Image (cartoon, coloured by chain):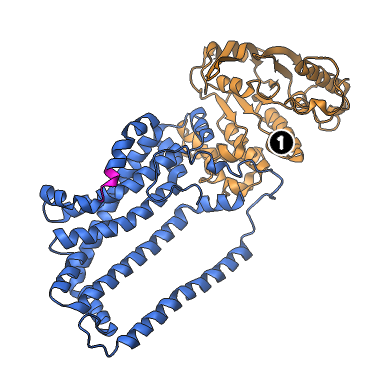
Chain colours: A orange, B blue
Amino acid sequence: MHGAPVLSVRGLSKRYHTRAGERLVLDAIEMDVARGSFLCIVGPSGAGKTTLLRCMSGLLEPTDGAVLLDGERIDKPPDRLAVVFQDYSRSLMPWMSVERNVLLPLRAKGIPRAERLRLAREALGAVGLSGSGDHYPWQLSGGMQQRVAIARALAYQPEAMLMDEPFASVDAQTRADLEDLILGVREEFKMTIILVTHDIDEAVYLGDEVVVLGGAPTTVQERIQTGLGERRDQLTTKSRPEFTQTRGRILRLIRGDGCVQGNSAQGDGAQVRSDSQACA
Amino acid sequence: MARSAPAGGRLSGSRLTGDRLSGGRRSGGRRSGGRRSGGRRSAGRLGRRTGSVALELAVPAALLAAWWVLSAGSSSLYFPPLSSIVSSLWHVWLSADLRSDVLPSLEHLALGLLIAVVAGVAFGVVLGLAPVLADAVAPILEFLRAIPGVALLPAALLLLGIGPKMQVSLIAYGTIWPILLNTADGVRAVDPVIRDVARSYRIGTPDRLLRIVIPAASPQIVTGIRTALSIGITVIVFSEMVGSTNGIGYQILQAQRSFAVPQMWAGMVLLGLIGFLLNLAFREFEHVVLRWHRGMRATSR
């Protein structure tokens, strides 16, 4: 599954000008995303995860360094990447039906009409929304809206899908469902996926590899192979020793100290869902 | 409508930015999926609507009946019986004058408004997308907007003479401002996430404008057009009274000058009716065009 990287980040830095002066947010980030792999980027809130993803998608220009897609430098959003944004209620057009939302980007690609329809319906089918094409997004639940956004990305047929905290605004059960949905989609479409999250459990559960961000300015603290294999399951995977070990290791990295007890892990941004095994 | 700018609009969009986000982060589990139960609710609303329509009709009907009875024996020159007003409405305004005066007035109004909508939305979109330009021209726009359309009549008469060209120009000028300023406001308030989506999916300029920016700003645009509509009626009547040889305004003034008092009153009743019907038609238009907006707001509460 590992070959030439589809997406590479080379020495990427991002500096913002604020009233207090210049602030270096991201410092010399290096990253390679293998074709067909699932890479999760995890870090505390405020670490610049979204900034990094925006740079990787071509929406934001890095101050230094570069993002390479198949070896070519990205300077504007390429048509081989699709982004799923965090806030589904804002990223879908409320004046368009679900199907039209999925179709809209395909028009720009110059795909013939019949083919566009086929792609849109296939993508909606893949996320379990075959019957909802004529609904408006706001008629659907939050989880279903985010599925529409995922379908829009799938129909676009990108080489890689970039997801910015895609499940942060839905409830726990929906979140687990969407996590499994995205694992299924990944297998079905053989898609490269890069997912940003502040949820360590989510990162370990989904990723083949987890890139841990931290520090100020933010750098790559470590890259960890989860080694959990292809088949994953909310119950069994999360109780495997590899899972709890990896999770504890990431938590320690993010906290920047040794073992953490109790609920103190909350509130620092990066979270684990239950603290009992954080020190495993 | 919290999102819609007040009538007339303002150029500073910051006030509006983010309003649409209220209720943005809704939890997924709160609403069960699928279409919201439509059947019973819409039936109830229909019933209420029928009821309110009946009420809307009953009060004017009662007033008209009272007017009819009280004025029946009137011999006053200034306050003729309603029957003679209705008769002149029917036999003068809606017969002989229909083609020569009423329809031309409506035609000029429609043409002037059409120009104002097209130009107002076009310039409004440009200003909304280019905040620097908008800031640069804001004082000029505020100045031009402050001159009432009717005040330009002498200049318009001088430059364009008596006739439809002058009237249509004056209507377009008088009605463009609320449309332009509201459009600019609406475009400026388009959610940055939507802009990111459009950029990351490389949506081309025509699609971006027609399928994203203008629909997103449509609630404000519609508010602007509604304001423009009432300004337009004022401007058309006034321009006909002063600078025309036909039209509803011209005929009302003629009737007054020749002491055809029932005909004068009938002209005003006609204007009231036209305004009422235009408003009704516009409400229906709004109902269809902004269906998504109403639905979205209803579910995000």
Mark 1, chain letter?
Answer: A
Quarter assignment of residue B84:
bottom left
Residue B63's x, y, as percent? 39, 80
Q: Is residue A213 visible?
A: yes
Residue most extreme to the bottom: B73
Instruction: Judge whether A226 appears above or below A199 on screen.
Output: above
Q: Amino acid at mark 1?
A: Leu
Q: Is residue A31 magenta?
A: no
Task: Give the position of the N terminus of chain A as an image quadrant.
Answer: top right
Relative horizontal placement of residue B193, taking residue A43 as reference (left or right): left
Q: Residues within 10 Å of mark 1 (few under 14, many from 20)?
A: many
Which residue is tagged 1? A178
Instruction: Judge whether B163 appears above or below B210 on screen.
Output: below
Instruction: Judge whether B47 appears above or below B15 on screen.
Output: below
Residue at (40% x, 47% y) in the render = B221
Residue A272's x, y, as percent? 79, 27
Tell me which segment is drawn in magenta.
B144-148
Residue A3's x, y, as percent? 66, 12
Magenta-highlighted stretch: main secondary structure? helix
Q: Is residue A69 visible?
A: no
Residue at (77% x, 15% y) in the render = A256
Instruction: Judge whether A125 appears above or below A48 on screen.
Output: below
